[in-house]
Image: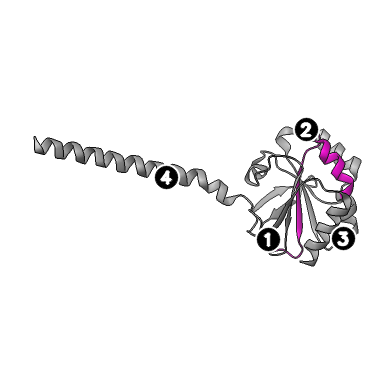
Amino acid sequence: MKKNIFVIVLVVLLAGVAVYQNAQRANKETLMPTEQAPQVNFLAPSFTLTGLDGKSYSIGGEREKPLLVNFWASWCGPCEEEAPDLVNVYNKYQGQFDLYAVNVTPGDKMDNIKKFVETHKYPFPVLLDKQGTNAETYRVVAIPTSFLIDKNGVVREVIHVLSAKELDKKIAGLIKG
């Protein structure tokens, strides 16, 4: 009888250890993407996308100039409002920072993307996040969302639509470092 109780306790204990290990493994797997999400004062997640111009553009790591990464879509009203301000601030500080407009393509149509870019005369690269995986990695839940990234590849701020004056102030601060 004592031997049977010992075996039962051992089996329950081993089952408990197995359940605990599986739970720990599941927690690690669900936490990994969160750990890779961009956070202020941490390195920006890296990715490379193709632009409308057919060239490849990379985000992540050290760069010559700071960078504003703007996630947007052609059907987005606030993106429409923000577009002229992005163009103006880019032209004002041209050569002092980079701006990549990342279109969240799965919810958009190529004809609409091209029309939007032509209408607003985007002078900066427009990247296509065709599967939306980069917007997902960056935890973009509302568009537009922009990430200000310094020359060291560190996220300095996450912003949404700002007044032209506030956007100008943020870019000037980013350039100044």
Tell which circle, 3 or 2, labels the residue nearer the N-terminal end: 3
Q: Mark 4 highlights which residue?
A: 25
- The magenta region covers 62-85
Graded by Cα atoms within 10 Å as few (under 14), some (14 to 19) or many (20 or more), the crowding at tag 4 reads few
Residue 109, quarter of picture: top right
Compute the Cα span from label 2 to label 1: 31 Å
Q: Which mark is residue 109?
A: 2
- Per the rendering, the mark at residue 54 is none
In the figure, is residue 20 to the left or right of 149?
left
Q: Quadrant of the C terminus?
A: bottom right
Q: Residue at x 76, y 61 (%)?
A: 66
Question: Callout 1, which amino acid?
Answer: Gly
N-terminal label among 2 and 4: 4
Q: CA distance from mark 3 to mark 2?
A: 30 Å
Report the disc number at residue 153: 1
Q: Quick one: 61 or 32, which is closer to the camera?
A: 32
| Mark 3–mark 4 distance (CA, rounded to whole Å) | 48 Å
| Quarter assignment of residue 155 | bottom right
* Helix, strand or loop status at disc 3: loop
